[in-house]
Image: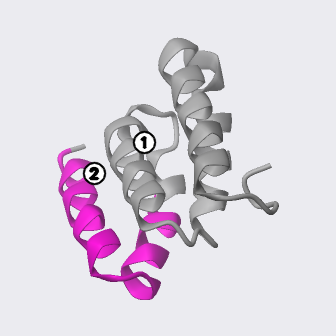
């Protein structure tokens, strides 16, 4: 649903819903994070990408395989604009503490 057509408000609503599910249901955390990671690969909305990256920094280290999310973060370092790269820097610090 996130990769399909739709405007910012539509995608923001879906991201908010996935984040709520992740926060309320620990069994859905990794599946939800994976969906969000795939979305930021082609996301044209900087604010959504940044929000998802912050979530990855907070929740990724608490998963069974935190290294799984490093590829997505690294791709954003290389390919994104300055605002998203700044969000990535904060995440890298969170992961190093593990």
Q: Residue 37, position in %: x, y? A: 58, 56
Local crowd at mark 1 within 10 Å, few (<14), some, or many (≥20)? many
Tell me where residue 76 appears, x and y as whole percent. Answer: 44, 74
* Residue under label 2: 95
Is 95 located above or below residue 28 in the figure?
Answer: below
The answer to whether residue 37 is above or below residue 63 is below
Q: Closer to the camera, 39 or 95?
A: 39
Residue in the image at 50% along x and 55% along y: 69
Pick the front one: 12 or 58: 12
Read off the residue under disc 1.
60
Residue 77 lies in the magenta stretch:
yes
Q: Main secondary structure of the magenta part?
A: helix
Q: Are marks 2 and 1 in contact (CB under 8 Å)?
A: yes
Asked if the magenta segment contains residue 80, the reply would be yes
* Quadrant of the rendered image containing residue 82: bottom left
Which residue is located at x 28 percent, y 51 percent?
A: 95
Locate residue 28, reporting x and y percent. Answer: 65, 24
Instruction: State the residue lying farthest toward the bottom.
Output: 78
């Amino acid at each position: 649903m996130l990769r399909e057509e739709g405007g910012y408000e539509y995608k923001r609503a879906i991201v908010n819903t996935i984040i709520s599910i992740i926060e309320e249901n620990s069994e859905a955390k990794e599946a939800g994070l994976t969906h969000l990671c795939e979305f930021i690969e082609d996301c044209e909305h900087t604010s959504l990408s940044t929000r998802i990256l912050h979530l990855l920094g907070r929740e990724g280290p608490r998963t069974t395989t935190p290294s799984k999310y490093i590829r997505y973060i690294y791709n954003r370092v290389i390919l994104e604009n300055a605002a998203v790269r700044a969000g990535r820097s904060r995440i890298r610090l969170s992961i190093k503490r593990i």
